[in-house]
Image (tube, rainbow, N blue to C red):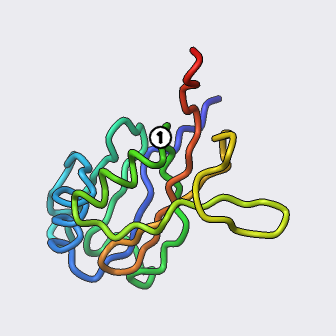
Amino acid sequence: MDYKLELVLLPVSDVDRAKAFYLEQAGFDLLVDTGVNGVGRVVQVTPPGSSCSIGFGTGITDATPGSARGTHLIVTDIEAARKELLERSVAVSEVRHLDAGGWVAGPHPERGDYQSFADFSDPDGNSFVLQEVGRPTRDA
């Protein structure tokens, strides 16, 4: 039996503001924006290239707006992804990696999978972590 993660719910305080952020700044694609039996609204957006979407709206979660933390977005080139988000006016942290002494500025020296990170948040404070995986080697 396969179990496919296809939707993660985010708690937001303003659905239209969140929708504008994810579509216009983060560059996600809109899949759904609909009412739900007169009791709420569901918006579903998908990061480019992802098979998992993000959902938010009214009447779909009782979590506190901004309480989602650390949702990982996997990218093959963390520096290019960061640059693209910055160009779209998303505030993104500097790229960093871990070594024996803790966090160090810049991507992992060997650009190893799961080693380089950067963060950003939506207008409510729900946070995302960019993580580099599958970066093509320059020798290939």
Q: Position of residue 43 (x, y in %)?
A: 23, 59
In the rendered image, residue 12, in percent from the top left (x then y), is placed at: 32, 77
**82 in relation to 61, above or below:** above
Q: Is residue 25 left or right of residue 69?
A: left
Residue 110 vs 18, above or below: the answer is above
Query: Is the N terminus in the top left, top right, bottom left or bottom right quadrant?
Result: top right
User: Which residue is at a point 73% across and 60% down the rendered structure image?
Assistant: 98
Residue 89, by quadrant, is: bottom left
Crowding around mark 1 (Cα neighbors within 10 Å: few <14, some 14 to 19, many 20+) is: some
Residue at 49 percent across and 65 percent down: it is 94
Q: Position of residue 56 (x, y in %)?
A: 31, 66
Tell me the SS state at disc 1: loop
Using the image as rendered, state which of residue 11 and residue 84 is in the foreground: 84
Residue placed under numbered mark 1 in the picture: 77
Q: Is residue 108 shown above or below 63?
A: above
The amino acid type of the residue labelled 1 equals: Asp
- Quick check: 9 left or right of 40? right
Residue drawn at 31 percent across, 56 percent down? 85
Q: Where is residue 97, by image quadrant?
A: bottom right
Q: How far across and down, in percent of the image, does residue 28 sit?
A: 26, 50
Give the quadrant of the C terminus: top right
* Closer-to-camera residue (89/9): 89
